[in-house]
Every structure is written in C-alpha cells, then in structure tokens.
Amino acid sequence: MKIKIAKMQPEHIPALAVIEQQCFHTPWSENALAAELEEDGSLFLVAEGPEPLGYVGCKTVLDEGYITNVAVRPDARRHGIARRLLQELQKAAEKQGLSFITLEVRVSNVAAIALYEKAGYISVGTRKAFYHDPKEDAMLMTLFLDKESAD
C-alpha cells in the first residue's frame, strides 16, 4: 500500500472525524479537529492513500511533545501506517528541537504498546483510572529525543 504523509489540511477533517468515530470511545468532532489547525504548537500528520487512512496528533509546549491521538482506519491496519506516522512525527519533533514525545495508552492495548516500544518509546509511569468508558489505567510512554532528557 503506497501512502504519503502530509500535514493535516481542512479537506482532511471530515475523513478524520470518521476515523475518530471508528477508533475511539470518545471521538473528537469535526469542530475539535478543525480547532487543532488554528492552535499554535499543534502538529497533525495524515497518512494518505487515495483518501486519509490515519493520523497522529501532537501538541508541543516549549521543548516537549504530547501525542493526543494515533488512529488508523480499521480496514487499513497492519500495513505499517501507524509506524510511518510515528517516524514522521519523530523527524518533525527533532527538527523542532523537542526533548521528548510522550503519550498515554490503555494498559490493555497490547498492540499499541508493542508499536510504541518498537518506535523507541519506554514506559515511564502509570496514570490511575485515566480512561473512562471503560475505566482503565493508562501507561505513560516517552520517546527521549536528546540524551540529557533521558538521564
């Protein structure tokens, strides 16, 4: 499957809202996604085939990156799309001089945890009862981009 990674544009928003509905218990609306385009420090990358297949969102504060969502259409999974999105996000974060990128993931989401570990993220803690519907702990995972942050 040939995919291209691009920055999110207004024309991506309807398809990304559908992906949100398919992937999350509490999906972001089209309005919420559109608001991300207007925010400083917000970086959303979209994997495109003939249409959007998935995306990763990241907010930056100073030299820190916080992944908000990683989502791939269910019918497009297992083709390396999430891996490519994370790789491109890491490149963008390094260009911006970020010290690290961090995220929360459900402790039961074994496939996502394995994906993040393969991308170099490590577990740095747990957020108790972070998720609702169903209630579940989150594993906090971080990719350190500079040696000083990792120490």
Image (cartoon, rainbow, N blue to C red):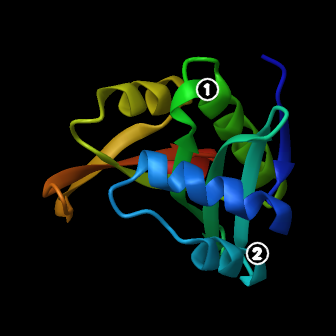
Please identify, in this view, whether the residue under mark 1 or under mark 2 is nearer the observer.
1
Could you tell me residue 132's position as x and y percent?
19, 63
Could you tell me residue 5's position as x and y percent?
83, 40
**Number of numbered discs overlaid on the protein picture:** 2
Q: Which mark is residue 76?
A: 1
Could you tell me residue 143's position as x and y percent?
53, 44
> How far apart in space, not on screen, are marks 1 and 2 (Cα)?
24 Å
Q: Nearer the viewer, residue 94 or 67?
A: 67
Q: Nearer the viewer, residue 63 or 14?
A: 14
Name the amino acid type tagged 1.
Ala
* Vertical position of residue 79 compared to residue 101: above or below: above
Q: Residue at x 60, y 44 (%)?
A: 147
Q: Which residue is mark 2?
A: 37
Q: Residue at x 33, y 41 (%)?
A: 123
Query: For residue 34, which quarter of the picture?
Result: bottom right
User: Tag 2 or tag 1, which sits nearer the N-term?
Assistant: 2
* Vertical position of residue 41 compared to residue 127: above or below: below
Report helix, strand or loop for mark 1: helix
Name the amino acid type tagged 2.
Leu
Q: Residue at x 75, y 48 (%)?
A: 46
Q: Residue at x 68, y 75 (%)?
A: 36
* Vertical position of residue 19 compared to residue 88: above or below: below
* Vertical position of residue 40 compared to residue 123: above or below: below
Image quadrant occupied by the N terminus: top right
Residue 9 in sight: no
> Position of 117 compared to 75: left or right?
left
Residue 92 in sight: yes
> Position of 89 compared to 142: left or right?
right
Q: Nearer the viewer, residue 7 or 62?
A: 7
Could you tell me residue 53's position as x and y percent?
69, 38
